[in-house]
C-alpha cells in the first residue's frame, strides 16, 4: 500500500515538473517574439487597439500605441547608450537608425533620453511634420537643444555633417530644419509607403552594417569636396 502511494507521489511530482518546464519554455519563446495581434475587419479601427486609419503628413498610417502588435516597436540603436527608440519596423527602422547612429558618432554624443521616436497621435500637430512621429517614421534628436520653430542650433561644422547624413539617405529622409516651420531636432521619412527608393537605401545600409570599415561610425570624410557638393545639391532640392 505504501509503495503504491509513493509511486503515485513520484508520478505526480514528475508531471508537475514537466508541465512547469514546458510552461517556462513557452514563456521564454513568447518573450523572444512580438505578441500576436488579433485580427480585425478592414477599417474597424474602433476595435483595433493600434490602427487609426489616418495618415501622418508623409502618408504613413499613425498608430495609437507602440509595442502593442502594430508596426511600431522599440528597437535598439547599436553603438549608443540609448535604451532604444520606438520606430516603424523594417526599411524605416534601418534608415532612421543609421541617421541616429551617425549623429551620435559625428555630430554630438547622445545620452539616454536624447531621442524620441513614436508619439501618440493626440500629442502631435497633424498639419506639421511632427505628425510623422505618430506613424513611427520620424525621430526627434535632442529636442531640448533644438526647439521647434527656431533655427541656428547647429555649429557650421555640425551642419555639414547633418547634410552629409541626408545625402547618405539619398532624399528619402528630410530634416525638419528645412521646413517652413523649422524643427531642427526632427528627421523623418519623406516618401510614401511602398517607395522603391526607400527599400534601396535601406538595403544599402544593411550591406554597410555587414561590411567592416563602412557605414555609421566609419563614414568617409563629410568635408570632402565631392561629398559636400552632393550634400549641398540635395539641400537645394529639399529646401
Image (spheres, rainbow, N blue to C red):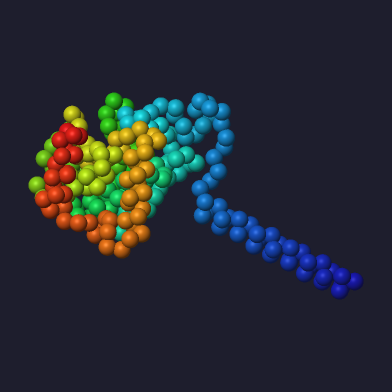
The residue at the point 35 percent across, 33 percent down is 192
Seen from the viewer's position, the closer of residues 228 and 20 is 228
Q: Quadrant location of the C terminus?
A: top left
- The number of discs equals 0
Q: Position of residue 49 (x, y in %)?
A: 49, 34
Going by the image, does 20 lie left or right of 224?
A: right
The residue at the point 20 percent across, 56 percent down is 220
Q: Residue furthest front?
A: 226
Going by the image, does 24 lie left or right of 195?
A: right
Q: Residue furthest left?
A: 156
Quarter residue 200 falls in: top left
The residue at the point 27 percent across, 29 percent down is 128
Q: Is residue 210 visible?
A: yes
Seen from the viewer's position, the closer of residues 4 and 132 is 132
Seen from the viewer's position, the closer of residues 154 and 167 is 167
Going by the image, does 117 lie left or right of 234?
A: right
Q: Is residue 120 visible?
A: no
Q: Position of residue 87 (x, y in %)?
A: 37, 43
Quarter residue 73 falls in: top left
Amino acid at each position: 500500500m505504501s509503495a503504491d502511494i509513493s509511486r503515485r507521489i513520484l508520478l505526480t511530482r514528475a508531471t508537475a515538473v514537466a508541465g512547469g518546464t514546458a510552461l517556462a519554455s513557452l514563456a521564454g519563446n513568447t518573450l523572444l517574439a512580438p505578441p500576436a495581434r488579433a485580427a480585425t475587419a478592414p477599417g474597424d479601427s474602433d476595435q483595433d487597439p493600434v490602427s487609426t486609419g489616418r495618415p501622418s503628413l508623409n502618408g504613413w498610417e499613425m498608430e495609437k500605441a507602440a509595442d502593442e502588435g502594430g508596426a511600431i516597436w522599440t528597437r535598439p540603436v547599436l553603438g549608443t547608450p540609448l535604451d532604444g527608440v520606438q520606430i516603424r519596423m523594417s526599411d524605416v527602422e534601418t534608415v532612421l537608425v543609421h541617421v541616429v547612429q551617425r549623429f551620435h558618432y559625428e555630430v554630438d554624443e547622445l545620452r539616454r533620453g536624447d531621442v524620441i521616436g513614436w508619439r501618440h497621435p493626440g500629442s502631435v500637430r497633424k498639419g506639421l511634420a511632427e505628425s510623422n512621429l505618430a506613424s513611427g517614421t520620424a525621430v526627434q534628436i535632442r529636442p531640448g537643444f533644438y526647439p521647434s520653430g527656431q533655427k541656428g542650433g547647429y555649429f557650421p561644422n555640425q551642419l555639414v555633417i547633418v547634410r552629409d547624413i541626408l545625402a547618405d539617405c539619398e532624399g528619402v529622409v528630410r530634416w525638419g530644419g528645412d521646413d517652413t516651420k523649422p524643427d531642427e531636432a526632427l528627421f523623418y521619412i519623406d516618401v510614401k509607403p511602398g517607395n522603391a527608393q526607400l527599400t534601396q537605401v535601406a538595403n544599402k545600409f544593411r550591406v554597410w552594417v555587414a561590411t567592416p570599415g563602412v557605414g555609421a561610425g566609419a563614414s568617409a570624410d563629410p568635408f570632402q569636396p565631392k561629398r559636400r557638393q552632393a550634400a549641398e545639391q540635395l539641400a537645394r532640392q529639399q529646401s
